[in-house]
Image (cartoon, grey):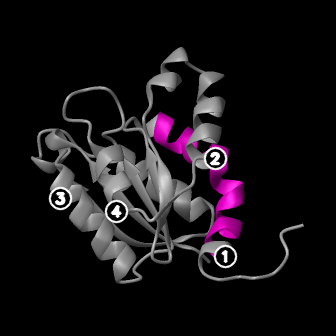
């Protein structure tokens, strides 16, 4: 059973102006995959705060998969990919490539997502869009490969064939 943490990145949700809808949608999706949701948080679109939360969860072995939602677009305060890039040690470009490819079948705006994925310590970090529907659809696009990915990240030496 994978342990998942969900970080919602939103100025408005962190200030209580708008309820967080994406975080709960991802939590429900994770549970439907039989993952254990071990941590959740909401933080503003602030690179330092995002970085601190990702590092805390990854370096303290809190979660196997850390999902962020929000801050992956083109707005000036969308800094989730930059924060994630600054903390990962190994990028995994195929994950966001697969998510964008799947999303492009639904909307041309998918090409505007700047989300990334990578490894820190024993955790896989994945940036997802901020809309609840897009976040869930993007996770659905890659979910089948994540247990294998985490297994390899955490040291499984068996053949992949």
Q: Residues within 10 Å of mark 1 (few under 14, many from 20)?
A: some
Dominant SS in magenta:
helix
Measuring 41% from the left and 82% from the top, which residue is drawn there? 61
Between the C-alphas of marks 2 and 3, the distance is 26 Å
Residue under label 4: 87
Residue under label 2: 94
Q: Residues within 10 Å of mark 2 (few under 14, many from 20)?
A: few
Choose the circle earlier in sequence order: 4 or 2. Answer: 4
Q: Secondary structure at mark 4?
A: helix
Asked if residue 26 lies left or right of residue 39, the reply is right
Q: Which of the 4 image quadrants contains residue 157?
A: bottom right
Specify start and end residues of the magenta stretch as a single range: 134-151
Measuring 65% from the left and 49% from the top, which residue is drawn there? 142
Tell me, yes or no, if residue 143 can be seen here: yes
Choose the circle earlier in sequence order: 1 or 2. Answer: 2
In the rendered image, residue 34, in percent from the top left (x then y), is placed at: 62, 69
The quadrant the N terminus occupies is bottom right
Choose the circle earlier in sequence order: 4 or 3. Answer: 3
Between the C-alphas of marks 3 and 1, the distance is 28 Å
Q: Secondary structure at mark 1?
A: helix
Residue under label 3: 49
Q: Secondary structure at mark 3?
A: helix
Measuring 32% from the left and 65% from the top, which residue is drawn there? 54
Q: Residues within 10 Å of mark 3 (few under 14, many from 20)?
A: some
In the rendered image, residue 151, in percent from the top left (x then y), is placed at: 66, 76
- Return the mark for residue 151: 1
Between the C-alphas of marks 1 and 4, the distance is 20 Å
Choose the circle earlier in sequence order: 1 or 4. Answer: 4
Between the C-alphas of marks 4 and 3, the distance is 12 Å
Between the C-alphas of marks 1 and 2, the distance is 17 Å
């Amino acid at each position: 059973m994978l342990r998942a943490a969900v970080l919602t990145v939103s100025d408005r949700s962190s200030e209580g102006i708008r309820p967080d809808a994406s975080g709960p949608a991802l939590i429900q999706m994770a549970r439907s995959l039989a993952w254990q949701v071990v941590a959740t948080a909401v933080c503003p679109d602030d690179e330092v705060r995002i970085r601190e939360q990702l590092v805390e969860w990854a370096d303290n072995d809190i979660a196997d998969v850390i999902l962020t939602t929000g801050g992956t677009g083109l707005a000036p305060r969308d800094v989730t990919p930059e924060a994630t890039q600054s903390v990962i040690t190994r990028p995994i470009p195929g994950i966001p490539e697969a998510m964008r490819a799947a999303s492009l079948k639904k909307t041309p705006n998918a090409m505007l997502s700047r989300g990334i994925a990578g490894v820190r310590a024993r955790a896989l970090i994945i940036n997802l869009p901020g809309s609840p529907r897009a976040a869930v659809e993007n996770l659905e696009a890659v979910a089948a490969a994540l247990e294998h990915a985490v297994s390899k990240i955490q040291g499984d030496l068996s053949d992949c064939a």
